[in-house]
Image (tube, helix red, strand yellow):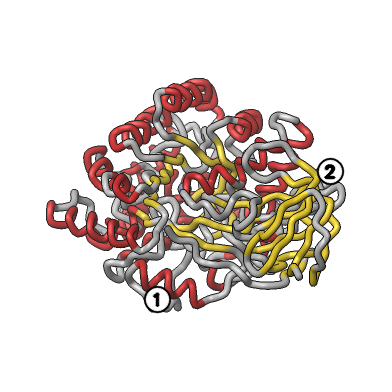
Amino acid sequence: MYDILIKNGTVIDGTGSPGKILDVAVEKSKIVEVAASITGQALQTIDAKNKFVTPGFIDIQNHSDSYWTLFDQPEQKSFLSQGITSIIIGNCGASLAPLLNQESIKTIQKWHNLSGINLNWASMPEFLQMLKAKSFGVNVGTLVGHSTLTRGLLGDQIRKLTLDEVKILDKTLRDALDAGALGLSMGLVYAHEVNSSLPELRAITANLKPANKYLSVHLRSEGSQILDSIDEVIDLASFHQIPIKISHLKIRNKNNWHLFDQVVSKLEIAYHQGVKISFDVYPYDTSWSVLYTYLPKWAYEGGRSHILEAIAGDMSRRKILDYLRDQNQDFKNLIVSDAWGNSNFVGKTIGQIAENQNVSIENAVLNIISAAKAQVMVFDHNLSAEQVELFCASPLSMIATDGAGYLGKSSVLAHPRNFGAMPRFLKMVREKKMLKWESAIKKLTMEPASLLRISDRGVIAKNNKADIAIFDPQTVTDKADYVNTELLSEGIDAVLVNGKMAYKNKQIFSLNGQVIKR
Ligand SMILES: [Zn+2]
């Protein structure tokens, strides 16, 4: 007797092979049979006629940890409802482990306020054990954040690491990788990494090679300096011959869009020279950014207290204002999506806030950052829709949310990609026909599984974990937008996680996620 039998669906197995009409039988946590006609009895039979049956999607670029929603909304409904069954956290330089000391965790402060948070772990094994003891809607694996490591040693100081500290860093990273962390992440734009030099980055990256694990990098620049930033990661990938994935690749601001062809050709040339480079992308033309990263580097290196001091000082404030005025940046139309302790800003444009405060746009930017203690997120409609689509279609891309999982009842204004990234991509594939379905599905399943080097997920095959998404290719679509950010997508019929029904008819049925480690 099977637990679940999925009949008559078009199985797109994730490998890139075209879909075939097949049945899929599930027993306990695994797929036990994939065949043309399975006749055995099952406790539950699902008729998937005219539906696609695919591996559950693996969200390779995820922030449920740094936004803390993994713990306060463990159902991760906004992901299950997109067909996502696994999330990889610890991205953009910030992870929740290993914590060298109390300072380390502060790397997530730019996204989430830490007051009232109780940490009962420090090392990676302790963190993974803690995750294992909890119940989540999706499977969870983590990277080690480079900022998390360095911040534990440097606190808010702006200086290079000493040789002894480098040794501590290397050992801490290696121990975490040995314990099952899936790789290392960098957030080179952020306060505690913006000063890191190429030799430093090469040195820490060396630890990935023996562990056969990958590096995920939030580029130093996604704007005017993006070409240099891409050279930097290509250097890191080729120097140690390790796989590198660029996080949420995009070209910010209209005046930089002309760099698109050069960005693509750099990546393609590197790839054809044997550099293991890939990137992930979210299918939206509006980014979701930490507001302080729009300030000059000198004003935010060293972290929050430095930012607030720089804004408060007469001279330094004037220098920042000059800098902001010189930027070719449409600050007026940025929409504040989150401002710690200042919900009155949320949903307003910076232009509206400036008008209310009767100050210049640039002054409003600084007032908001200062009022919310530097914890401010904004929506920035700064990407080219056409380029986003081309990135989605690229053979080097995977699709990811770069988001956090929500239950759908929160008061925050979060980016719609948290609820709609995968269905929006699938709708794009249906309408624009820029990819075959099988190639599109591979980007959500086997591609990320291969980067993680996990062999039992990401493909529908006998003996693999039964992480499965069933959806209607004719109707699948996202619904969430920048006003109604928490609308569930349509067309995702059912989602299985480790052999159990996790999501069906827009309801959560089980929290059956496991910890993914290697
Ligand atoms: Zn990032």
- Viewer-nearest residue: 328 or 81: 81
Task: Tell me which amino acid carries mark 2.
Answer: Gln
Query: Assess mark 2: CB under 8 A from ligand 1?
Result: no
What is the x, y in percent for residue 142?
45, 59
- Viewer-nearest residue: 191 or 45: 45
> Which comes before the other along the chain, label 2 or label 1?
1
Q: Is residue 144 above or below residue 248?
A: below
Q: Is residue 363 visible?
A: no
* Quarter that holds the N terminus: bottom right
**Image point (66%, 38%), residue name:** 440
Mark 2 residue crowding within 10 angstroms, few (<14) / some (14–19) / many (20+) = some
**Image point (26%, 41%), residue name:** 202
Disc number at residue 328? none
Q: Which residue is mark 1?
A: 119
**Image point (79%, 58%), residue name:** 6
Residue 154 in the figure: left or right of residue 265: left
Residue 516 in the figure: left or right of residue 443: left
The number of discs equals 2
What is the x, y in percent for residue 29?
63, 66
- Viewer-nearest residue: 83 or 21: 21
Q: Secondary structure at mark 1?
A: loop
Mark 1 residue crowding within 10 angstroms, few (<14) / some (14–19) / many (20+) = few
Q: Quadrant of residue 108?
A: bottom left
What is the x, y in percent for residue 244?
41, 40
What is the x, y in percent for residue 128?
42, 69
Camera-nearest label, 2 or 1: 2
Q: Quadrant of residue 468?
A: bottom right
- Viewer-nearest residue: 130 or 343: 130
Q: Which residue is mark 2?
A: 474
Task: Tell me which amino acid carries mark 1.
Answer: Leu
